Image (cartoon, rainbow, N blue to C red):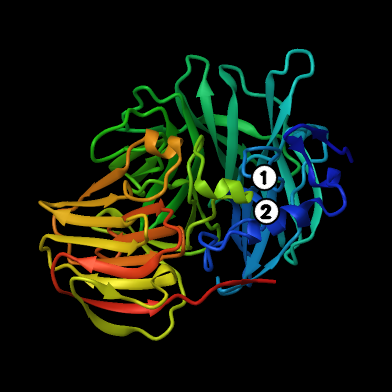
């Protein structure tokens, strides 16, 4: 075992006595923004969901984690286990302490193999002579109680024809019982793609089969594919990935980075796409992954690379989305949250309406495809969060809330085209909102920051709604 401690490349093995507790006290001083029913870091930064797996009893949810502050430092894997997405306990961590992961345990997925959890992940390393990145593809084996048993490297360099940016293996088991994993990559001509590897078993050397082709996807300006995920859903093949470099547009691909899906039929190593679309139209969503051995439950990262948030001063950054059940409807992905609600109440929201605990509440609002403007929350600074529907476009406007300079850099309004809007399902959790249009036909996930807020909503017209408090999760 190696104890790494070099600036931000500092592992948990190098922590000093009381160090994390001191950081935790700073996190606890955040009285406005820390969530109640989203998985968030006790200290430091969360990003990508990793190693998502159902073992027959428990769901295992890992997350990229830097423990020491609100920045992208040495990545560990935090580990949660749950039977019901309500009560969680912690499992064994993935801590970088081998040379094949000297600069962090990057993203990956997991399979259940011979009764063990086998997590595939990228070990980030740097060559001492010139500090060049050398990606290693590794496996970590856990038992189903969450205990780490072993880890080792299976590929110690990037394949010929590709740059140092080869990462995020997501494994699956083929119908023939072989192990395959899809791997994000950058070609030497600086374009993004995904690679398919195959192994007969865990003792076999991974073999590069081919690139995965996605027909009809416009790869112009895309320099990297991250977090690939290939699976079956509703009789179709579905590929989820995060292409980096697409040009921003007015009503789609509005962020600096994006999460996309393609649905169709896989023919060999080519996906004949029947529909391609973003998974989420909000400000803050990236790197989604589905749970292996499940009916395709998905988590995403409520965040984006290269962003800062007002909560960074409290030494915590980002969280995971609620779990979402995926299905297909008319050839498109529908996302429905898995969440526990208290008793629902029917209300009529008028010009200015107070709702107890609105900032941790669920609302289902009947829009009836008519123009509507909703202003949520208020404070003495005049801050609010605005949702608007008119002319077939739903918009989320956070311009009148607290933002960092980097948040403002990428715009203050997000738009989503929807031909007919019947219902809005809105989930608030203090500084995050997840919005589902028409039961999940379209989704917007966003952070927002309104301190000392009044729990009220102002509506441009009278609308009927159902309101319920969301039951907080517990982590033991």
Residue at the image position 74 percent from the left and 48 percent from the top: 140
Q: Which circle's residue, 2 or 1, is located before the other in the chain?
A: 2
Quarter of the figure that contains the C terminus: bottom right
According to the picture, the residue beneath numbered tag 1 turns out to be 69
Lateral position of residue 188 relative to residue 359, left or right: right
Mark on residue 415? none
Q: Is residue 466 above or below residue 439?
A: below
Contact? badges 2 and 1 (CB < 8 Å): yes
Residue 163: x %, y % from top left = 58, 19
Foreground pick, 314 / 440: 314
Foreground pick, 356 / 473: 356
Q: Quadrant of residue 351?
A: bottom left
Mark on residue 43? 2
Foreground pick, 342 / 297: 342
Lateral position of residue 321 relative to residue 253, left or right: right
Q: Is residue 355 above or below residue 426?
A: below
Asked whether the viewer can see residue 74, the reply is yes
Quarter of the figure that contains the N terminus: top right
Q: How many tags in the picture? A: 2
């Amino acid at each position: 075992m190696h104890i790494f401690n070099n600036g931000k490349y500092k592992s948990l093995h190098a922590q000093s006595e009381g160090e994390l507790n001191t950081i935790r006290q700073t996190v606890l001083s955040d009285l406005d923004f820390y969530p109640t029913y989203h998985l968030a870091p006790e200290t430091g930064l969360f990003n990508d969901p990793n190693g998502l797996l159902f073992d027959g009893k428990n769901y295992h949810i890992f997350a990229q984690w830097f423990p020491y502050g609100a920045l992208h430092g040495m990545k560990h894997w935090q580990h949660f286990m749950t039977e019901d997405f309500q009560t969680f306990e912690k499992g064994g961590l993935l801590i970088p302490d081998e040379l094949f992961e000297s600069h962090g345990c990057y993203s990956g997925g997991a399979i259940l193999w011979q009764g063990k959890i086998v997590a595939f992940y990228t070990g980030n390393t740097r060559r001492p002579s010139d500090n060049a990145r050398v990606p290693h593809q590794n496996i970590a084996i856990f038992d189903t109680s969450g205990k780490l048993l072993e880890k080792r490297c299976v590929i110690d360099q990037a394949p010929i024809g590709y740059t140092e940016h080869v990462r995020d293996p997501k494994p699956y088991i083929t119908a023939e019982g072989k192990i395959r994993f899809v791997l994000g990559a950058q070609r030497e001509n600086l374009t993004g793609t995904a690679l398919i590897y195959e192994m007969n078993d865990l003792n076999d050397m991974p073999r590069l089969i081919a690139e995965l082709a996605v027909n009809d996807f416009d790869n112009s300006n895309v320099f990297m594919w991250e977090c690939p995920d290939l699976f079956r859903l509703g009789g179709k093949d579905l590929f989820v990935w995060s292409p980096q470099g697409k040009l921003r547009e007015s009503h789609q691909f509005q962020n600096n980075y994006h999460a996309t899906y393609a649905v169709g039929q896989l023919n060999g190593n080519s996906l004949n796409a029947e529909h391609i679309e973003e998974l989420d139209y909000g400000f803050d969503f990236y790197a989604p992954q589905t749970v292996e051995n499940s009916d395709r439950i998905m988590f995403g990262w409520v965040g984006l690379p290269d962003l800062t948030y007002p909560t960074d001063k409290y030494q915590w950054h980002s969280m995971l989305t609620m779990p979402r059940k995926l299905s297909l409807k008319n050839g498109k992905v529908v996302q429905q949250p898995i969440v526990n609600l208290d008793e629902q109440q029917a209300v009529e929201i008028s010009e200015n309406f107070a709702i107890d605990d609105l900032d941790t509440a669920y609302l289902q609002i009947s829009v009836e495809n008519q123009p509507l403007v909703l202003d949520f929350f208020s404070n003495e600074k005049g801050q609010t969060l605005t949702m608007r529907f008119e002319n077939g476009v739903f918009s989320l406007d956070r311009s009148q809330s607290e933002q960092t300079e980097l948040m403002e850099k990428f715009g203050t309004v997000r738009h989503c085209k929807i031909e007919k809007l019947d219902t809005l399902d809105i989930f608030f959790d203090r500084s995050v909102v997840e919005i589902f249009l028409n039961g999940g036909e379209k989704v917007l996930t966003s952070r927002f920051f309104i301190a000392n807020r009044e729990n009220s909503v102002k509506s441009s017209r009278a609308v009927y709604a159902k309101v319920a408090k969301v039951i907080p999760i517990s982590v033991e």
